[in-house]
Image (cartoon, rainbow, N blue to C red):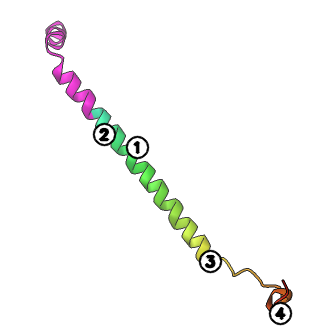
Amino acid sequence: MSSLFLALVRENPWPGIAVASLNLIVAVSLVGVGLLLGLTISVLAWVHALADSEPAPTHAANRRGFA
């Protein structure tokens, strides 16, 4: 049975090519989703840290207008 299957695969490579290209599309899609998710989490963490930070203290010299 396996020799018959291998003979069919050798004669017609298109099913193997189709499966390989489908695997490539799935892999690229998963990598893209992972990168997008990582970027989204990074931006949300940055915005959260920016919103929680206290304003920088101003010095008395800056308020009196010294250059």
The residue pinned by badge 1 equals: 31
Q: Earlier in the sequence, mark 1 or mark 2?
A: 2
Residue 49 in percent (x, y) is at 61, 71
Residue 59 vertical position relative to residue 1 in the rendered view, above or below: below
Quarter the N terminus occupies: top left
Image quadrant where residue 20 sits: top left
Q: Residues within 10 Å of mark 4 (few under 14, many from 20)?
A: few
Residue 32 vertical position relative to residue 20 in the rendered view, above or below: below
Residue that protrudes farthest toward the front in the picture = 67
Q: Residues within 10 Å of mark 2 (few under 14, many from 20)?
A: few
Type of the residue with mark 1? Val
Residue 58 vertical position relative to residue 3 in the rendered view, above or below: below
Q: Earlier in the sequence, mark 3 or mark 2?
A: 2
**Residue at position x 48%, y 56% from top?**
39
The residue pinned by badge 3 equals: 52
Type of the residue with mark 2? Val
Q: Earlier in the sequence, mark 1 or mark 4?
A: 1
Quarter the C terminus occupies: bottom right
* In the foreground, 64 or 5: 64
Structural distance between the alpha carbons of marks 2 and 4:
63 Å
The residue pinned by badge 2 equals: 26
Type of the residue with mark 3? Asp
Please give the range of residues in magenta: 1-22
The residue pinned by badge 4 equals: 64
Q: Earlier in the sequence, mark 1 or mark 3?
A: 1
| Residue 38 lies within the magenta run | no
Image quadrant where residue 22 sits: top left
